[in-house]
Amino acid sequence: MFDWNDLKYFLELARQGRLAPAAKRLHVDHSTVGRRIVELEKALNTKLFDRTLTGFVLSEAGHRLLASAESIEVKTIAIAENAGQPTALSGAVRLATMEGLASFYLAPRLVEFYESHPGITVELITSTQLLNLTKREADLSLSFVRPTGSRLIVRQIGHVDLRLYGAPSYLGEHGVPQSLADLSNHRFVAYIEDLVQIAEVLWLHDAIQDPHIAFRSTSMISQHNAAAAGMGLVMSPSFLAACDSRLRPLQIKGLSVKRELWLSTHEDLRDMARVKALMDFIKKLVERDQGFLDGQIDC
C-alpha cells in the first residue's frame, strides 16, 4: 500500500515539472520530493515520470494517476472548506485560446487574477487548432468555436464584434469604402486558408466574396501590423484594433460580423478549485468587458 501523503508530492511535481519549484511550493528540499516520488513509484510498481534534461514529464501511468490524485485533492479541499478552514489555491491551470484573444485581451488582464490568486500559475496556450479537452491537452478553452467531445462542459459567455480597419495612409490613397459594393475596389490582408484549421477565423468571407488579397499570414498579429503599414484592409476583432491609433475603423453599411465566445472544461475538472477560480474570473471579465468586446467602448 502506498503512502497517501506521497500524492501531494506527485501532484506538485506533475504541475511544476521540476524538483526545485515543486520543493519550494511544498516547503521542503528537492531531495525530499525526489525521494517521495521514488517511494511512490516503488509502492505502485510503475514509473510515473520520464526524467528528461529539462525536468520531469508524466508517463502514461502518471497521467492516469493524475486524474485520480486531482479528484482526491478536490475532495480534500472540499472537506477543509466545509469545516470552515481557509485553503490557498495553488498549481497551474492551462488555458487554450486563440492568438488574438490571448495577446490582446487576456494576457494584459490576467494580472487581476494573479492578484487574487498568487498561488495559481496560468499557462496560456495559443494554437492554430483547437486543443482536445477530452484528452486533457488543456484544462480550459476559450474559443470562437463551440468545442465538441465527450463529457465537456461548454458555456457561451459572450461574443466579439469584428470590423474592417484601414491605415490612414492606405485610405488616403484608395479612398474610404462606404458600402459592401465599394469593397470590391480594395485589397486586403487575411489568413492562409489552407493552413487554417478553425474555419470561424475566416471572417473576411463574411464581408466580401473573392476579395483581392495582397498579404496572407497564419498570424493575426502579422496581419494587423501589415494593415497598419498600409498593405490593405483587415478584418479584426474590435478589441484588437480599438486601441491602435495606426488603424481607423470603417463603418460599412450592411456589414455586421460577430463571433460567440465559448468557455469549456472537462467534467472531471469543473469542481477543481483552481480551475473553477479561473473559469469564474473569465466569465466575470467577459461580462464586465462586453461593451468593449462589442466595439461600443474604446480603450
Image (cartoon, rainbow, N blue to C red):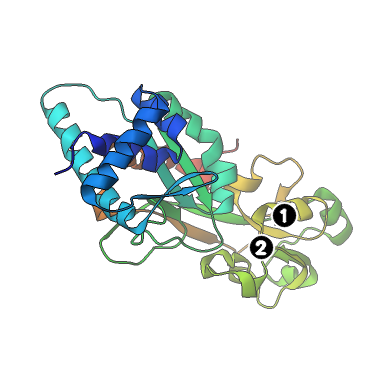
Give the image location of residue 37, x and y in percent: 32, 39
Q: Residues within 10 Å of mark 1 (few under 14, many from 20)?
A: some
Left/right placement of residue 197 relative to residue 268 reads right
Q: CA distance from mark 1 to mark 2?
A: 8 Å
SS of the residue at dot 1? helix
Q: Residues within 10 Å of mark 2 (few under 14, many from 20)?
A: some
Left/right placement of residue 257 relative to residue 19 reads right
**The disc labelled 1 sits on which kind of residue?**
Ser
Left/right placement of residue 98 relative to residue 218 reads left
Front residue of this view, candidates 68 and 280: 68
**The disc labelled 2 sits on which kind of residue?**
Thr
Give the image location of residue 64, x and y in percent: 28, 55
Front residue of this view, candidates 160 and 87: 87
What is the tally of numbered marks visible in this picture? 2
Disc 1, disc 2: CB below 8 Å?
yes
Q: Residue furthest right?
A: 173
What label does residue 218 carry, if any?
Answer: 2
Q: Which residue is mark 1?
A: 222
Residue positioned 66% across, 57% down in the render: 219
SS of the residue at dot 2? loop
Q: Residue furthest bottom?
A: 210
